Image (cartoon, helix red, strand yellow):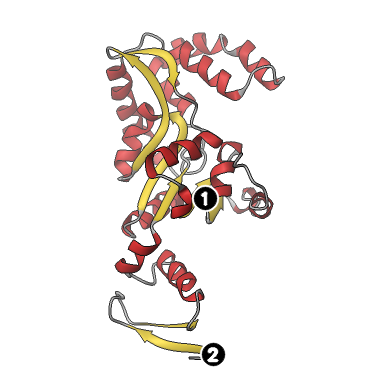
Amino acid sequence: MDNKMQCKTARSSWSNPILTCFESPSSDDKIWKIYLIQKGLLVDNSFRAEIKVLSVFDFDGTLTRHDSFIPFLRFAFGNSVFTRRLVKLALPTLRCLSRKLTRDELKEILISTFLTGIEEKWVKEKAEAYCNLYWGRLMRASGLLAVATEVSNNVEVTLCSASPRLVLAPFAERLGIKLIGTELESVNGILTGRITGHNCRCIQKINRLESIYGPLDQYHLRAWGDTRGDYELLAAAKDAHWRHFHPRWDRKKAFIHRLKKESFRV
């Protein structure tokens, strides 16, 4: 065959007859199929098995309208206790802003201040109640649709977030997807106020994903993120989405083109 454009009606394993055009024979055929599958125009389960798609969503700010962990703490402890404990974080926050304290260190202080000596079961119950009460106000409708689309395409889908896994578990369960988050240390069902391992952001997102799924270069990796903590994940993705569910003025699409030229894998 030559490289002229050939059109044919796709039937067989495709869900509906549609007219597609692609250059054949060529490696571009695979690119076209990936594109059509992502757009929901093609169902080809045998091809899905070949390409091994892994879809990874950040949670806070990406699927949600704002951070979820601080509002969760306020919901769980009530305004009075929340305010008293938050005051203790004023100095560490100033030190973080002046770069004398890292974001990860500030996160550890936050968790220690609120969750030391707290029953894990109590946090789980509060997280479930928080999810049920604030789901509609917290979640972005376009983000929910995107997650549902990935799930319906029968690909591997997971949240990968810096927020505690314990808090996000009800959200992941409701979405019907896997969950990777920051792990809280627990001894005999009581939280110690410490993090197990590392805060799940930046390069730690890559490390956590690879610890579960293996080398990411074996997947067609699709990723959605919105902050500095997602840079490495987006750089590793073959299909990266920066602030995809945000208002158009806040998406800054040009950022992705700069990002893809950099390497964060050191």
Which amino acid is tagged 2?
A: Lys
Residue at the spot of label 1: 245
Q: Earlier in the sequence, mark 1 or mark 2?
A: 2
Q: Where residue 264 appears, x then y in whole percent?
A: 62, 42
Q: Is residue 3 above or below residue 74?
A: below
Of residues 50 and 178, the one nearer the viewer is: 50
Label 2 sits on a secondary structure element that is: loop
Q: Where residue 212 appears, x then y in whole percent?
A: 38, 40
Nearer to us of marks 1 and 2 is 2
Mark 1 and mark 2: Cα distance apart in space: 38 Å
Q: Is residue 71 above or below residue 190?
A: below
Query: Does the image show residue 64?
Result: yes
Which amino acid is tagged 1?
A: Phe
Residue 232 found in image quarter = top right
Residue at 44% over, 36% down: 208
Q: Quadrant of the C terminus?
A: top right
Crowdedness of circle 2 by 10 Å Cα count: few (<14), some, many (20+)? few
Residue 18 found in image quarter = bottom left
Residue at 30% over, 66% down: 45
Q: In the figure, is residue 84 to the left or right of 260?
A: left
Residue at 48% over, 83% down: 25
Q: Where residue 48 appears, x then y in whole percent?
A: 35, 64
Say the numbered circle drawn on residue 4.
2
